[in-house]
Image (cartoon, helix red, strand yellow):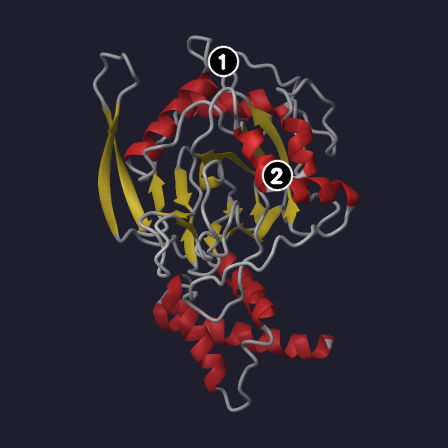
Amino acid sequence: MRAHQAELAQRVRAAASACHASLGHAQSVAWLGCVQTTLIQEPAGFPVQQEATLLKDLLLNYTCDVDDGGTPAIRSVTWSWRPPGSAAVPVSLRVDVLQESPPILLVDDFVSDDECSHMVNASMGDMMPSPGYPSGGNRRSYSASLFPRWDVEGDVVARVSRRLVAFVREAGGYPDVPEVGQEPLSAVYYREAGDEFRSHCDGECRGGAYWAGRRIATSLTYCQAAEEGGHTIFSLSAIKVVPRKRRMLFFGYKLRGGNARGATEAMDGGLSEHAGCPIRRGTKVVLTQWLREAVTAERDWRHYARLDGEETFRNAVARTPPPRRGPSPSPPPLPSSLPSPQCEQPLTAAEARSAAAPPSRRAWVAPPLELGTGAVSPSESLTSRAL
């Protein structure tokens, strides 16, 4: 079996390399299609359907290590924003559209250096192994939650959260996303070579039904970019985003306008599946925000997460598979023969435990780092905290 897989891996890499040389890049549906066509047309053929998972992993591994500059925008628009009640001149930012539906948008300079430094430094003292690490092989990183203090004037997390929600409403195409009731901002720290997050979805990604309170979109704000590696890849389209400090990536998974089966409100069928490529050199810090509609201060994200994944929550602790609720609807056709994505449930036991209240100071459980106490001073920077 190992020899067979090794032989298939060698053939996939040769086809991926040939298409990379022919197209000048290793990204997009064009590259994926070229690789599959090349493999199928080989004299020996290639078991694309039978080895779909292996093929997807091998292609992800290949494109992760190709520095081709990232996927170019299909068009760009301008988004202008001014804080509520402010008399300041609005700030205009260019929004690059990488995919129309579900949307994938990219914005440079979404946050300031000071905002990044503040939030990263504020989270470092609370960093713990991310859910699934080190016991699982899908994710290797550390994370901590940052809670906006809406009643504190000048609170940095609240300011960034308010700006993000305004963007999601006005540029992202989800006008019903509220400020309050959302999940806390998650600071994710990829500390050393090999740290990664394999292919996953942040919410429903098999073309299922939408209901109020589900996760519908994600933003990733890069506050520290690795010197090498760490790209964000959308697995089924090979759209590639190169992290850059202060850059924000936004993508949705609630389909705007419904799906091909006539449902007016439906969820993505796989195009939001994504991966954080392994770090090869340096470190990466990402601020992740998952977004929902219909949440309020009184009935916040935890209420809907438990409704959405109640069996998942109970059985994540018991380590038993959740009971079936009935047949799942068939997803719409995907753009390639790659397998359906692995979908991450909205709530895990670890997330539920850590999100029950704002975190208290906890001991850093990773290998020792010189990160100080986690307290923030106005003069501190990423560099001064040895990131």
Nearer to me, 331 or 93: 331
What's the CA distance linking mark 1 and mark 2? 36 Å
Q: Which mark is residue 347?
A: 2
Examine the image and state in which quarter residue 22 appears. bottom left
Examine the image and state in which quarter residue 122 appears. top right
For label 2, the crowd category at 10 Å Cα-Cα, with few meaning under 14, some 14 to 19 and many 20 or more, is: many
Question: Extreme front residue here?
Answer: 326
Q: Which mark is residue 379?
A: 1
Position in image of residue 275 (x %, y %): 53, 51
Nearer to me, 314 or 44: 314
Quadrant the N terminus occupies: bottom right
- Residue at 62% of width from left, 25% of height from top? 124
- Above or below residue 255? Residue 169 is above
- What is the three-letter code of the residue carrying label 1? Ser
One can see residue 237 in this view: yes
Position in image of residue 76 (x %, y %): 24, 45
- What is the three-letter code of the residue carrying label 2? Leu
- Residue at 62% of width from left, 33% of height from top? 143
Nearer to me, 163 or 302: 302
Question: Extreme right residue here?
Answer: 318
